[in-house]
Every structure is written in C-alpha cells, then in structure tokens.
Image (tube, helix red, strand yellow):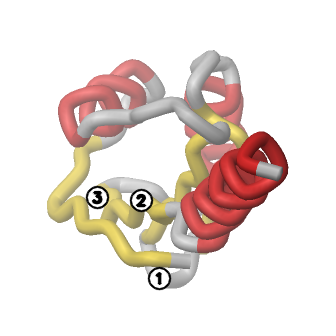
Amino acid sequence: MRFVSVFAALAMSLTASMASAEVIHANVSGMTCESCAQAIDAVVIANKNVRSVKINVEKGKVCIREKPARHVSDLDVSTMIKEAGYTTTRIWRTQQ
C-alpha cells in the first residue's frame, strides 16, 4: 500500500510541475518581417532545451516554451536572438 501512495504522490508532483511550466517572453528589436521571424525561429528551435517557439512580428515578441525538466536561461535567449541577428530589449517569464 505504501508503494501506491508514493507513486501517486510522485505522479501528482510531475503533473503539477508540467502544469506550471514557464513561458519565456522576449521583446526583440529589429524584427520587421516574416524572414526575420524565420531566422529567429530556426536558431531558437535548434536549442535542445526548447520545446516550441511562437513569434509575433507585429508586436516584436518571441515566446519560448522549455522542454520538460529543461531550462533556458535569459542569457541563452539573448544569445540565440543575437545569433539570428537581432537584439532582445526585455525578457520575462510567466507561468503557463
């Protein structure tokens, strides 16, 4: 019986951590068209810790979701955006 309760607690913990995953948001300077977005997308999605990326050109915003149990630092985000040829002006995180 104890094994079942430990397993249930672990499953609940994993479910809670997946439900409260962080989304990383970055304002990007210089991104003006779909080609810009494609360049950023290619660099960001190549990162082994990135699950997905969404880009809004009109708002100059990039949203990055991490893979479960992985971490993408603010420095990682700035570096990826810089590699694509652009500059981050602000990075923040929200719970999703």
First of labels 1, 2 by sequence position: 2
- Count numbered badges in the picture: 3
Say which element carries label 3: strand
Q: Position of residue 48 (x, y in %)?
A: 63, 17
Q: Position of residue 6 (x, y in %)?
A: 67, 48
Q: What type is the residue that disc 1 sits on?
A: Lys
Say which element carries label 1: loop
Q: Against 92, is 67 above or below?
A: above
Mark linked to residue 29: 3
Q: Are marks 3 and 1 in contact (CB under 8 Å)?
A: no
Q: Are marks 2 and 3 in contact (CB under 8 Å)?
A: no
Mark linked to residue 59: 1
Quick one: label 3, few (<14), some, or many (20+) residues within 10 Å? some
Question: Which quarter of the rendering shows the C terminus?
Answer: bottom right
Q: Nearer the viewer, mark 2 or mark 3?
A: 2
Quick one: label 2, few (<14), some, or many (20+) residues within 10 Å? many
- In the current view of this chain or complex, which residue is farthest to the bottom? 59
Q: CA distance from mark 1 to mark 2?
A: 15 Å
First of labels 3, 1 by sequence position: 3
Residue topped by disc 2: 24
Q: Can the viewer see residue 69 in this picture?
A: yes
